[in-house]
Image: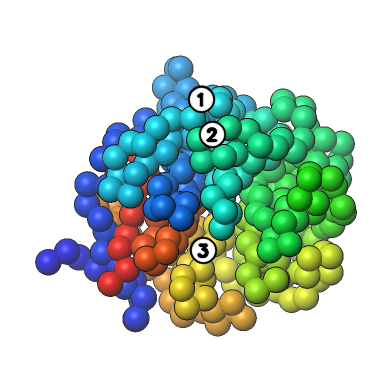
Amino acid sequence: MARRFGVDMYQFEVVEGWPKQEIKGVAASVACDSSGRAYVGIRNIPPGGGFGNILPGEGRVLVLNPDGSVHGDWEFTFSSPHAVWVSPTDEVFVADTGLHTITKHAPSGEVLMTLGTPGTPGAPGAPFNMPTAAVEAANGEIVVSDGYGQNWMHRFTAKGELIESWGGGDPVFIQRFHGGPVTGVTATEPGKFNLPHDVFIFNSVVYVMDRENLRWQTFDLDGEFISEVTGVNRPCDVAADSDGIFHIVGGGGVAIWTPDGQHLGDWGEKGTDPGQFKFGPHGCWIDGEDSLYIGEVGGNEGLQKFRRV
């Protein structure tokens, strides 16, 4: 009998042998379309060895069939794909921290829209400086977390026209990442951020995973602050199951929360066996069957699928 992972009624079994393809690089993110195909954002192994990170390099999107076999590789060359998100109409959004862009693609990889100037960071407070995630609201507007190089959120029309930006906060995380002096002050007040790492829209509420502040914040679509939930262990990415329960990866494992901030439990083990995490859980997705997909950073070959039981 396969070993189970989870908390209380939220139980999973790892799908051993998935994916069938060796993932040569860092599987930073994963998202599935309505047919169950998985789009994996991969930071390629640098030429000198090691593993890719959020800085400019070379990346790709690998498409897997539901059984984990390879469906295909996109021809588009990314720099450092950080987050992949698939809309209900199967349009694929990719946030690239190396290119400073958000791109929207057809399932084939065809580019439908580009936000930002490839290879050029925006001015302070303007799109984009190492953006971390992008999602589409029910009205077609696009909301972006612009989190590594600066601490801002941006909202665009469906055609890609900037409507507004909100947030702010000194970029202390990226200063520490580069090993230089930290000249700013961490912003902890409501509506400010210290690395907005993921954005998720649920029931018309914008949830922002404010990772280094160990919290999430909620806003309406106009960027007006609603609430915050603290004590969240370095939230990197969030996916909701069919019951509307949040499964948040980060801090070494999976945390289960209700959307209103009730913490239901945590699971995840460090190790190399199936179902354990070799590196750091970073990206996640829940498909139509409530299966959970998790991509890890900090090393290569970190991608697993967990079947809900």
**Image vertical order of residue 198 relative to residue 47, above or below:** below
Proximity of marks 2 and 1: CB atoms separated by less than 8 Å: yes
Q: Quadrant of residue 179?
A: top right
According to the picture, the residue beneath numbered tag 1 turns out to be 75
- Numbered marks: total: 3
Could you tell me how far apart the alpha carbons at marks 2 and 3 are, in whole angstroms? Answer: 23 Å
- Labels 2, 3: front one: 2
**Image vertical order of residue 299 relative to residue 224, above or below:** above
According to the picture, the residue beneath numbered tag 2 turns out to be 109
Residues 255 and 113: in front is 113
Mark 1: which amino acid? Answer: Glu
**Is any atom of residue 69 visible in this view?**
yes
Residue at 70 percent of width and 71 percent of height: 204
Mark 3: which amino acid? Answer: Ala
Q: Bin the neighbour count of mark 1 within 10 Å (Cα to Cα): few under 14, some 14-19, many 20 and up.
A: few
Q: Secondary structure at mark 3?
A: strand
Proximity of marks 3 and 1: CB atoms separated by less than 8 Å: no
Residue 187, how many percent across, how many down?
Answer: 79, 59
Query: Mark 2 or mark 1: which comes first in sequence?
Result: 1
Q: Is residue 73 left or right of residue 115?
A: left
Could you tell me how far apart the alpha carbons at marks 3 and 1 are, in whole angstroms? Answer: 28 Å
According to the picture, the residue beneath numbered tag 3 turns out to be 239
Q: Secondary structure at mark 1?
A: loop
Could you tell me how far apart the alpha carbons at marks 2 and 1 are, in whole angstroms? Answer: 7 Å
